[in-house]
Amino acid sequence: MSLVKFKKKNRPFANLVTSDFFDMEDFFDNRFWNRGMFDDDFWNGRKGEPALNIKETEDHFEIELAAPGFEKKDFEVTIENGYLNISAEKSMKEEEKEEEYTRREFSYKSFERSLLLPENVIQEDIKARYKEGILSFNLIKKEVAKKQLPKKVEIS
């Protein structure tokens, strides 16, 4: 048996696949099999969702949603079946006509987020505010009856 030198020139990605920076097994395990292809942000479009921060204090929740580039009128916020539904839509069209040419530009962006509200939130008192690209919510908690210590029941 004789050894034959492997020729990489006929394989366009051979240098990438055989380099120390590319692990073929790790690439396929992590992206497709272990995490699942549809859990990956690239496939399911999560990159378009705005970032969200939720902070809980003793008497309320604070929610901040990063949505720069929108105006107050672009948002629709509803409460339905225990969910806080937030959506926004903005489009822009611009047209410039000259003798020699017509220039048209347009853009469109939108998002939707739904948050399940905890049972201890007073839904009627939810306040929202939009300032400097941040949509903020203040959710006041209800007074919940104090938890009683377990009571031992005697068996007769």
Image (cartoon, grey):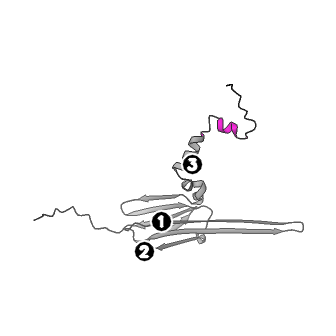
The answer to which of 80 and 54 lies nearer the viewer is 80
Give the residue drawn at x 46%, y 59%: 54
Secondary structure of the residue carrying numbered label 1: strand
Which contiguous range is marked in magenta?
Answer: 11-23
Give the residue drawn at x 28%, y 68%: 145
The total number of labels drawn is 3
Secondary structure of the residue carrying numbered label 2: helix
Left or right: 104, with 112 as reference point:
right
Q: Residue 31 has which mark?
A: 3
The quarter of the image holding the N terminus is top right
Q: Nearer the viewer, mark 3 or mark 2?
A: 3
Identify the residue under disc 1: 115
Image height check: is 132 above or below 122?
A: above
Identify the residue under disc 2: 124
How far apart marks 3 and 2 lie (CA) works out to 43 Å
Give the residue drawn at x 60%, y 54%: 42
In primary-sequence order, the first of circles 1 and 3 is 3
- Look at label 1 and name its amino acid: Leu
How far apart marks 1 and 3 lie (CA) works out to 28 Å
